[in-house]
Amino acid sequence: MSSHPIHPNDHWVAAAQSGDRDAFRHLVQQNQRDVYTLAVRLVRDPHLAEDVAQETFVRAWRALPAFRRESAFSTWLHRITVNTAWTHRRRQKRHRHADIDEVQTVVDETRRHNPGHLDDTLHLSVALREALNTLTAEQRMVVVLKDVEGWSHIEIADALGITAGAAKVRLHRARRRLRALLVDVDW
């Protein structure tokens, strides 16, 4: 009987752990979109997210021999992505503004699907982005991991190196701050 749960990628992971670069390349191809998407949500910059994603896979390759397969490979990669994004966020200068490309995407999508609600949608999108940008990096990461990615408090705690209780407290404080900032916004 196996000491860890069976995961769909176990064959590829075992081969990659044995030094098979093609197997690792397969794992990268399977997970690159999810890693990049998570990185964008965490660092709010598509170009920086590319760097985070690339560094995530470099770190994963180096750490692969120590991966014990107690969780899914994708979960392990997400933890590395969070840690890598965390490192990059600490280095990054804090620019607190909405990315014009992201706002334009919202405008274009709204025009296509709901032309009459463009002003409302744009207003709400900008208000929410500005509110999220006022959170500390720690609070924003917890909000993204919980409310966008759907992670449990335990998964967040493991990824950030904090207790589950601390993750809950950060999330509670972040949500309270968001509510306070958005109370005056016309919904």
Image: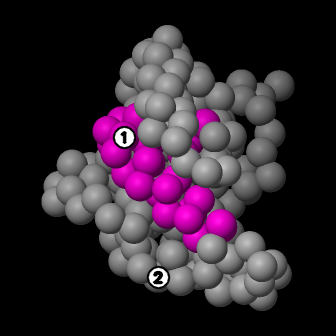
User: How many numbered tags mark residues here?
Assistant: 2
Nearer-the-camera pick, 150 or 54: 150
Q: Which mark is residue 154?
A: none
Q: Which mark is residue 135?
A: 1
Residue 156 visible (yes or no) = no
Left or right of residue 90: residue 147: right
Q: To which quarter of the image does residue 135 belong?
A: top left
> Badges 1 and 2: C-beta atoms under 8 Å apart?
no
Q: Is residue 136 magenta?
A: yes
Q: CA distance from mark 1 to mark 2?
A: 21 Å
* Image: magenta residue range: 120-146
Give the SS element for disc 1: loop
Mark 1 or mark 2: which comes first in sequence?
2
Nearer-the-camera pick, 157 or 126: 126
In this rendering, the answer to whether 151 lies above or below 129 is above
- What amino acid type should be assigned to the residue bearing mark 1? Leu
- What amino acid type should be assigned to the residue bearing mark 2? Asp
**Residue under numbered circle 2:** 101
